[in-house]
């Protein structure tokens, strides 16, 4: 596992955006996706609000995905496995990079065809607790024509990342503006933030 952690951290250090395969095992990823689909069918997902103090909040409709926060209180085996994995990653990150992360929060996200999340920055204007953004995609066989790429705005270029299952993305929450381009296909993920409280 440390190898995959290193891969994510090294590519983050090199490119400002860490990308790796296999952070979630295929089996954990499949179980989490099944959870997400069941939650969606049971109408547990809610419209994702945008914090009042979000840095970039000029447009009326900024995002149209639906979300559900993961929580140990759900007593769900796979959510707990996910949190165990995150504990290992945070401990490793703190040990190797002196990041001082003290907490995190994660939600499932589901984008129906025709939905998006416009350009934004993840760290809130009046609350700097979000340090690192992480996204784990749960979509098998994603094709170019499905759209829904994560577009990250670097100083001199734009980077498009397709939301294929197995892929995890990691970047600094205060730094990089990004958006989810309009998706043509149902698009599922787990998104969250490593925090200093
Ligand atoms: O799903 C993604 O690719 C990015 C989601 C995102 O930017 C967010 O939830 O803040
Ligand atoms: Fe974001």
Image: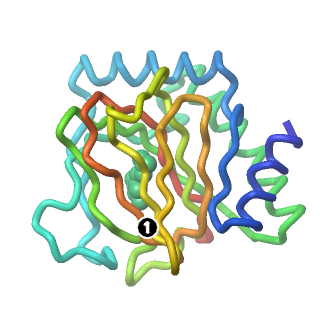
* Quarter of image, ligand 2: bottom left
Relative side of 169 to 164, left or right: right
**Along the line of sight, which residue is nearer the eye, 7 or 37?**
7
Q: In the figure, 140 relative to 57: above or below?
A: above
Label 1 Cα crowd, 10 Å radius (few <14 / some 14-19 / many 20+): many
Q: Quadrant of residue 99?
A: bottom right
Q: Residue furthest bottom?
A: 126
Residue in view at x 24 percent, y 18 percent? 42
Residue in view at x 35 percent, y 69 percent? 120
For the N terminus, give its image quadrant.
Answer: top right
Percent x, y for residue 145?
33, 33
Residue in view at x 45 percent, y 36 percent? 189
Residue with the mark numbered 1: 122
Q: In the figure, 30 relative to 80: above or below?
A: above
Cβ of mark 1 under 8 A from ligand 2: yes
**Along the line of sight, which residue is nearer the eye, 14 or 104?**
14
């Amino acid at each position: 596992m440390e190898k995959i952690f290193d891969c994510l951290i090294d590519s983050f250090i090199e490119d400002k955006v860490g990308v790796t395969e296999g952070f979630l095992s295929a089996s954990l990823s499949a179980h989490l996706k099944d959870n997400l689909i069941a939650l969606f069918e049971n109408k547990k997902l809610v419209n994702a609000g945008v914090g009042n103090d979000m840095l970039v909040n000029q447009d009326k409709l900024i995002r149209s995905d639906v979300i559900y926060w993961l929580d140990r209180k759900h007593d769900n085996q796979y959510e707990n496995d996910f949190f165990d994995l995150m504990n290992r990653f945070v401990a490793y990150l703190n040990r190797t990079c002196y990041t001082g992360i003290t907490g995190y929060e994660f939600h499932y996200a589901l984008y129906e065809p025709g939905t998006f999340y416009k350009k934004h920055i993840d760290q809130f204007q009046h609350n700097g607790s979000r340090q690192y953004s992480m996204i784990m995609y749960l979509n098998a066989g994603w094709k170019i024509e499905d759209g829904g790429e994560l577009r990250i705005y670097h100083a001199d270029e734009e980077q498009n990342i397709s939301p294929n299952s197995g892929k995890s993305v990691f970047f600094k929450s205060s730094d990089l503006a990004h958006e989810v381009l309009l998706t043509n296909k149902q698009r599922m993920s787990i998104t969250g933030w490593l925090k200093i409280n």
